[in-house]
Amino acid sequence: MTATPVPTAPAPAASGAPAARTHTVRAVRTAGGLSVRVEPRAVAVCLLLLALALATGIVLIGSGDFPMAPGDVVATLLGDGTAVQEFVVLDLRLPRVLVAVLVGAGLAVGGAVFQTLTRNPLGSPDMLGINQGAIVGALGVIVLLHGDATAVAVGGLVGGTLTGAAVYVFAWKRGVHGFRIVLIGIGLAAMLTAVIHYLITKANLVDATRAVVWMTGSLEGRDWTQFWPLLAVSAVLLPLVLAYGRPLRMLEMGDDAAYALGVRVERVRIVLLVSAVLLVASATAAAGPITFVALSAPQLARRLTRSPGPNLGASALMGAAVLLVADWTATNAFGERQLPVGVVTGVVGGCYLLWLLVTERRAGRI
Amino acid sequence: MLVESSSEQSAEPQAAAQPRGRRSVRAAGLLLSLGVLVLVCVASIVVGAKPVPLGDVWHGLFQNSGTGNDILVADVRVPRTLLGLLAGVALGLAGAVMQALTRNPLAEPGLMGVNAGAAAAVVTATSLLGTTSFMGYVWFAFVGAAIVSVLVYVLGGGRSATPVRLALAGTAATAALYGYVNAVQLLDSAALDRLRFWTVGSLAGADADVVAAVAPFVAAGVVLAALVARPLNAMEMGDDTARALGANLTRTRVLAMLAVTLLCGGATAACGPIVFVGLMVPYLVRALTGPDVRWILPYAAVLSPVLLIGSDIVGRVVARPSELQVGIVTALIGGPVFIHLVRRKRMAQL
């Protein structure tokens, strides 16, 4: 028997707003007796986000010191470009955009899983120590071992994964509860932050600058060597998490209700947690800890699709789109100066966070 | 909301049944704690990269000849110890007041983002306005601490906040503010070089000027905290009961937040962000004294500097020949205490 934590329990009837929103749900039935629920609005949102991500990606490939019209970019991607265009597009800019897509999708799906498991719109991996763990791992490599970019990425991956494991172990007490994951994560994050500051004071100024750049999260100079490992991880984990979307949605109703509906709660939770931690840690290893994508993308997706539950597919597309738009803003909106993408997501995310806190507070949900 | 009700209900009748015995035990405990504090202060003057014999400590304090160990004692170790004392008192009291005010065992300046607010303001001052002196940026630290503490308190839900919600609001604010701090440091590597030592939380930069500058703020904060002890006691029983008992809720809240801001802003401006001291000490003290705020505050004020100066001594000793900054030591000690606190059974009811 496990007690449901009181604090995050929503008050569905009180707010009134959800009842006013009616969304149509269609069921598609096949001859064999199988049926799939289709929400037209969610499908439309997904298609829109996909189009947005594609358009931004093409614009992003076309912009830079060697500007190209969108038509040329598409032609080059289809194999009709000149040699120079092919070099610029295929060797320099395409891998960066693809890394952005995978990082955004991975962070968003990881965030959606964490937010659902902790039953809190603020319970994203950025807040729960995974990012800090990854930073400690990467900074350890930068400051103590003076490693190259690949070693730094491996350090980040190891650090993030170990922290995720530690959160789970410490939060375990006859089952893992959402609120305990949140608090343990925050405690570990505070400890790891101290270690991060220590490592920065130990570094010389060159290493310290490199460390701060890494800590901000940047897509600068990402190439195919970052893309392939990330693709391998994502190709395994994204479908796995998407396949667990149904039991994850059941878990939102509380452990007891999910049990009653036939969900093996602890197994589902550990599979999803491990996958989410690995997704977030590998995204962080590839691009540094880009904050607030994991926090905001699932919430934005949920509001756009207006459907309950974790919305994993829409979240993934939203994450990719958000990161691409943020990267375009970071490289083009500040004149000559190119900022790391993490600065943009940080500032935008900070504003979003304030708004979230105010509205959620008014609705009494957090 | 169930708030620590079981412990309070079991503790209060006992205290009422044997008030005199309990009070003398508490007073004796406070005296004992003061003795420990004096010992730790002496140890802080003695221990370090160059150990100072006890006799020389006395000599350096009262017959400063301006040579050898006397300089070390008077100009380095004593200011450092005094700063540890001030910062310890400030952080411990701020944590205790905050916990009583929010009725929340996890309320802590560091976790609530107050330090990050001060850090963001200091970074702004150093980078944009070129402020380098302590007196220049102490005001910015106050403004940053004040804005963020009020913001997190309000966004976290005030007195209806649950620990999870308050901690998340604080963590989120911290993440956003440190994002800003990192961005500024990235664009201005001179600021990074100056600030990377400040953001870690250290007593090493202490000199007499810093101590003299921060002392009035901490003193004002201590007075305010002492003033709100009684009404806070009443408020522990709930807003309605407190009002019935004659406490002025709005005034108490404003004064308490002002005290927290003065204490945290002063400590953070002088030492940089130090986490977990304000969390650990009031929590441990509560186990000794029971829920009476009038006893929690003096105990916290005495035992917090013991922890802070003790951590500073440990930091000087373990990483020889260099030093481990005190903010790192307190975080490494405090993290496990925090995790233990979260794993307690009663947290589930909060």
Image (cartoon, helix red, strand yellow):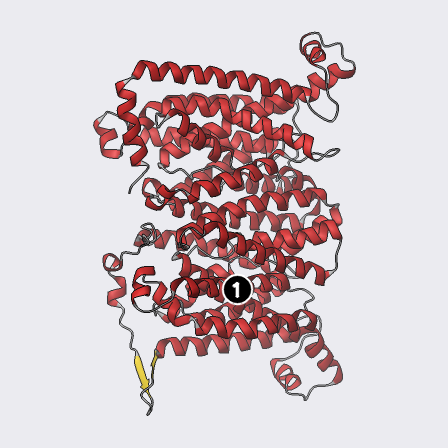
> Helix, strand, or loop for circle 1?
helix
Mark 1 Cα shell of 10 Å, populated few (<14), some (14-19), many (≥20): many
Q: Residue at x 72, y 18 (%)?
A: B52
Which of the 4 image quarters holds residue A64?
A: bottom right
Q: Which residue is mark 1?
A: A107
Which of the 4 image quarters holds residue B270?
A: top right
Let me know if residue A309 appears in the view. Answer: no
- Is A220 situated above or below B275? below
Q: Residue at x 44, y 18 (%)?
A: B29
Q: Residue furthest left?
A: B244
Percent coordinates x, y for residue B68 in the rendering: 78, 16
Q: Residue furthest right?
A: B67
- Is A50 situated above or below B330? below
Percent coordinates x, y for residue A350 in the rendering: 49, 53
Determine whether, in the image, residue A248 is placed left or right of residue B66.
Answer: left
Q: Residue at x 47, y 70 (%)?
A: A241
Relative depth, front residue between B324 and A204: B324
Task: Say what amino acid the circle numbered 1 marks.
Answer: Leu
Let me know if residue A18 appears in the view. Answer: yes
Q: Residue at x 69, y 22 (%)?
A: B76
Relative depth, front residue between B209 and A282: A282
Percent coordinates x, y for residue B55 in the rendering: 70, 10
Determine whether, in the image, residue A108 is placed left or right of residue A28.
Answer: right
Q: How many marks?
A: 1
Which of the 4 image quarters holds residue A356?
A: bottom left
Q: Residue furthest bottom?
A: A31
Pinpoint the chain carrying mark 1: A
Percent coordinates x, y for residue B221 in the rendering: 46, 25
Determine whether, in the image, residue B314 is placed left or right of residue A240.
Answer: right
